[in-house]
Amino acid sequence: MSCVNTAGSAASRPAQPVHRLQGIRYPGRDYRIPAFYLITMTSLNRKPLFATCENGKSTLNKDGWLVYDLWHRMETDYPAIETSTLVIMPDHLHGLVRVKERMDKPVGVPLRAFKSQVTSSLRKRYGNPELRVWTPGYHDLAVWRKGSLSAYIHYMIDNPRRYCLKKANPDLFSRVNNLRHPRLPQGETWSGYGNMFLLDKPALRSLAVSRTVLAARIAELRAETIEWAQGGGVIVSPFISPGEKDMARALLDAGGSMILLKPDGLCPFFKPHGRYFDLCLEGRLLVLSCRPCTPAAAALTRELCLAMNRWCAEIADEPSETMEDCSAFNSMRIQWG
């Protein structure tokens, strides 16, 4: 793997580091106080400066190892911080920084110094005083809970596998803005991420399951879902209610495919995580949205739920009048295409 989980120097040259995370500077936050910060920095224009993908792993080159060494030197230059898990990818890095005690200056000071040191060293190495290495700024995410910290570390460590698989299978991780397709409802501006060819499948069904549906009916629906999936059918749904989520699990376990309507928009750095990443890799997922990107999850109003159910029916080429219910609200109906 190309992950180095260490708080020390690079004396033993382990397999190599890993990357990824987005965030922004949070107004009003005191960046001098103790906390863990997940940091993401990217190379200018996303040039693959630091590593290459080989056999699903990110292998550092000499410039990547220079970045590695200077990253861990930060805790020597600034004793109030500790550098921990670091993941370096060809065009970006993810690093975990712990502020151990209150600092005189914000944690951004050593981070900017690190970027400057990398740039100065590479300019000297290549004899190019105009060399630019980094995209301006960086992304940070403050992590406070232990459970969240473990989850982020796991995400970082798994990043080389995901990154290299995406590079090897770009069609399965494509994003299209202003997506146009005969199945998509008119009058909306659609964006999509994943396997766009799922829209061309002949067998699509919309799914809406009320929160009040009895367990016996859920079991029947689960059996129908498995049969549909094994027959090559695609389910179209927001997968919001507990019943819909149950159907999603059954669908995926059976090897089926899904078109997922996202109630909020696809932000610039959107990408599926966890199991949904693997679904993209297998060509079994398409995420659709016709909403603008929002910093927080969209409020699930009745109107939005009704609209999503209507859109699902239209995408599946079903009569829209059958979709008058909303899966996120208490009504007594199940709709299966």
Image (cartoon, rainbow, N blue to C red):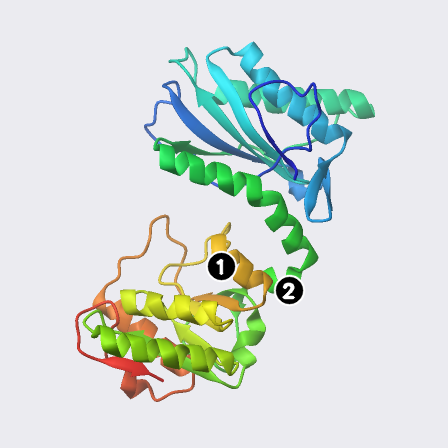
Image-based side of 101 in relation to 78, left or right: left
Residue type at mark 1: give it.
Answer: Tyr
| Alpha carbons under labels 1 and 2: distance apart | 15 Å
Give residue 45's position: percent from left, percent from top.
66, 42
Q: Name the element at disc 2.
A: helix
Q: Give me the residue at 34% from left, 67% from top.
A: 246
User: Where is residue 27, by image quadrant?
Assistant: top left
Compared with residue 15, is residue 304 higher up or lower down, i.e. above or below?
below
What quarter of the picture does the N terminus occupy? Answer: top right
Would residue 265 be seen by someone viewing this image from the given angle? yes
User: Where is residue 106, by image quadrant?
Assistant: top left
Give residue 215's position: percent from left, percent from top.
23, 73
Q: Which mark is residue 186?
A: none
Residue extending farthest right: 127
Q: Give me the residue at 73% from left, 20% from top.
A: 121
Q: Which of marks 1 and 2 is in front?
A: 1
Compared with residue 131, is residue 170 higher up or lower down, i.e. above or below?
below
Would you say the residues marked 1 and 2 are in contact, meaning their CB atoms lie under 8 Å apart? no
Q: Give me the residue at 32% from left, 28% from top.
A: 28
What residue is shown with label 1? Answer: 276
How many numbered marks are there?
2
Would residue 24 be seen by someone viewing this image from the given angle? no
Compared with residue 277, is residue 4 higher up or lower down, i.e. above or below?
above
What quarter of the picture does the C terminus occupy? Answer: bottom left
Give residue 14's position: percent from left, percent from top.
68, 28
Q: Residue 171 carries which label?
A: 2
Residue type at mark 2: give it.
Answer: Asp
User: Where is residue 25, by image quadrant?
Assistant: top left
Give residue 80's position: percent from left, percent from top.
46, 12
Q: Name the element at disc 1.
A: helix
Image-based side of 68 in relation to 182, left or right: right
Q: Local crowd at mark 1 within 10 Å, few (<14), some, or many (≥20)?
A: some
